[in-house]
Image: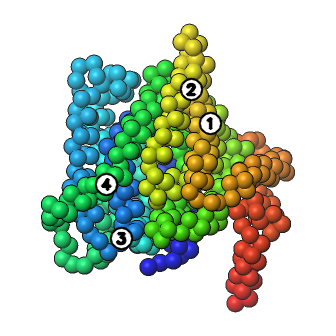
Amino acid sequence: MESLAGRYLYKLAANIASVPLFLVMEAVLPRALGPAAYGNFNFSTALFQNITNFLDLGTSTCLTTTLAKRPREFGPAAFYARVAGVVPALGLLLAACCYLPGVGEVLLPEVPLWLAFPAMLWAWLTWVGRVARGMNDALGLTAASERVRMGGSVLSACLLAGLYTVGVLDLPVLFAQQYAVLALTGAGFLFTMRGSWERPLRWALSGKELRRYAREFWRYCSPLFVTALCSVLALSGERWILQFFSGSVEQGYFSLSQKIGAACVLFVTALTPLLARELAVAHGREDAAGMARIVDRYAPMLYAMSAWISCFVVLEAPAVLRIFGGESFAEALLPVRIMALYPLHQGYGQIAAAIFYANGNTRLLRNISMATAALGPAATWSLIAPGDMWGLGMGAAGLALKMVGAQFLSVNLLFLAARRSVPFALGRNVLHQLACPAFFFAAGAAAGVATSALGDADDLFRFAVSGVVYAAVTVGLAPAVPGLFGLTRADVRRGLRMLVGRGGV
């Protein structure tokens, strides 16, 4: 079994290596498709991905939590293989409904209806890969899993770059490329688990075992049904409101801003599945103090990593937008700046949710999620709808503003509730949420001023130099203010000793 530090370093290294691949893919697609087609692709796939996540109903999280607690028991995986078949069957049925007279025009306004089935298949393959990767993390197979993920990313980037170079990258070709990569990657995730259980694998389950697993999954997942339903209605409804009132081009602007926000959170996503597993293991030992130590140790670190990137992207958004979207996405500047702030609280939110999943208190998680989700559609309407329908007509920027605000509210409510069962330092974490971005914004602004003579706001050379200055200033000040980075002075001394040791070799 790999250590937590070792698994995190492997995931972090894989995420760092995937950054240029991600940049290649997301710089190619907007240019190849244009704002409207890019918006149609992202809206249709997001709609069916939300539906697939709803059909999941938290069962995949229950599976990974169970495997983390009982890694040598194959029964949960055998049981889940029976449950998982329901997801594609119901998903394809819903996609078929889009071809009924009048239904598709309502569900997918301004979107070619032929996208329904391809988008549903894409969402299902993405879900399969996510479940299989979560199982790898639960079983402690992070290194092998990350090698598979990196292989899939390299393949995807090479294929997209090649298709774009020869000028054949359109929506049908894009879906075919995505299917090939997702299927191969998902198969790779499943292959890495081949030695996790004793052979031969016992797929047959007795009636008693089926009933036992069904009760276990039901107790875990049944409180999440209403949450999942509210979530799919809220998330799909928000994108639908944007599509209906603002059209495919604004949908493309928002999609690009969302992708840039996702790039800012790559470092955070490396650690959160591992922390979720460690929280589940600590809860299995009834070690609340151990769970608190995990939160206090890693939550500020995750937040600092997100803030370090997000604050710089907010300040340097014109250059970032030129890299990703080009001239056709020039009007996406405000949505990009707003959505760059979205990753700030994502790490905190995933850790808080992991606490509820670990202790099985999904009912409270459901209640909090429902309370915040209920505000979403009304807020989205008021920000996006035109003035004659009681809205501000903000388009993509409106949805981005709603997303960031809802994230901030829901995460802090989750942390307040989680504090009842896990005695972490709430006040210190809240103070860190305020001080950390203020420091990075100040450092980023200083770097921008220092390099302003080198070019305009969207000049790529000035942007690169500004990034080097920003990194040098922030990293250079880390030993003086380690708490802002989620570190301790002992961490800094240990890091310096490692650097000195390596330098002396």
Question: Is any part of residue 393 visible from this angle?
Answer: no
Q: Nearer the viewer, residue 162 or 41?
A: 41
**What is the CA distance from the residue labelled 3 to the residue labelled 2?**
43 Å
Amino acid type at image mark 2: Ala
At x 21%, y 57%, the residue is 211
Residue position marked by numbered label 1 in the rendering? 405
Rendered location of residue 101, percent (x, y):
23, 19
Rendered location of residue 124, percent (x, y):
31, 47
**What is the CA distance from the residue labelled 3 to the residue labelled 4?**
14 Å
Q: Residues within 10 Å of mark 1 (few under 14, many from 20)?
A: some
Chain-order first, disc 3 or disc 2: 3
Relative to 185, say whether 387 is above or below: above
**What is the CA distance from the residue labelled 4 to the residue labelled 2?**
34 Å
Label drawn at residue 217: 4
Amino acid type at image mark 1: Gly
Residue position marked by numbered label 2 in the rendering? 379
The image quadrant that residue 421 belongs to is bottom right
Q: Are marks 2 and 1 in contact (CB under 8 Å)?
A: yes
Label 1 vs label 4, nearer the camera: 4
Rendered location of residue 222, percent (x, y):
34, 46
Q: Are marks 1 and 4 in contact (CB under 8 Å)?
A: no
The image quadrant that residue 183 belongs to is bottom left
Residue position marked by numbered label 3 in the rendering? 70
Label 3 vs label 2, nearer the camera: 3
Chain-order first, disc 1 or disc 3: 3
